[in-house]
Image (tube, rainbow, N blue to C red):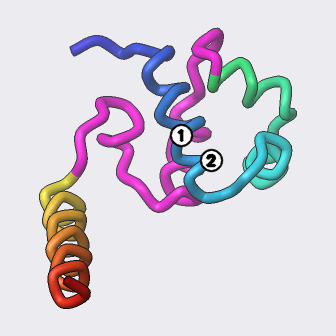
Amino acid sequence: MLYDIQKIGNRIRRLRKDQGMTQAQLAMKLNISDRHLRRIEAGEKGPSIDILIEIATMLDVSLDYIIMGKQSQSDLKQQLWDLVQSLSVLVKEL
């Protein structure tokens, strides 16, 4: 697998949006300019390891996920459990 800054940027953008955060808000928390964050999210510039660690911590994901797109087993189990719970509620409503 290659270090793909385009995919990394896309994952960071999606995670940021999922948390309801603007580029300006995340950039401020990371102590970087919003222009710098825009370039990272656009895949024009690869983030430093320090920035990657901060992003992972702030967005509550693993570095594996940000860099390689791999979710941990516990994350996948939690998603499956959440789905089962949602389906159980729907079944009861029927």
Residue that sits furthest to the bottom in the current view = 92
The residue drawn where x is 29% and y is 12% is 2
Element type at marker 1? Answer: helix
Q: Would you name the residue on which mark 1 appears?
A: 14
The amino acid on which the numbered mark 2 sits, given as a three-letter code, is Lys
Magenta-span inclusion, residue 65: yes
Image height of 18 relative to 5, above or below: below
Counting from the top left corner in percent of width and height, residue 74 is at: 17, 65
Q: Which residues are magenta?
A: 42-71
Residue that sits furthest to the front in the current view = 94
Counting from the top left corner in percent of width and height, residue 80 is at: 16, 65
User: For residue 65, what is the image quadrant?
Assistant: top left
Q: Would you name the residue on which mark 2 appears?
A: 17
Of the 4 image quadrants, the one containing the N terminus is: top left
- The 10 Å Cα crowd at callout 2, few under 14, some 14 to 19, many 20 or more, is few
Image height of 4 relative to 69, above or below: above
User: For residue 24, what is the image quadrant?
Assistant: top right
User: For residue 47, what is the image quadrant?
Assistant: top right
> Does residue 80 appear to the left or right of 49 in the view shown?
left
| Front residue of 58 and 81 | 81
The residue drawn where x is 77% and y is 54% is 29
- Separation of residues labelled 1 and 2 (CA atoms): 5 Å
Q: Residue 63: give its label.
A: none
Contact between labelled residues 2 and 1, with CB atoms less than 8 Å apart = yes
Image height of 44 relative to 33, above or below: above
The amino acid on which the numbered mark 1 sits, given as a three-letter code, is Arg
Q: How many marks?
A: 2
> Does residue 34 appear to the left or right of 72 in the view shown?
right
Counting from the top left corner in percent of width and height, residue 87 is at: 19, 74
Magenta-span inclusion, residue 45: yes
| Front residue of 50 and 21 | 21
The residue drawn where x is 61% and y is 47% is 16
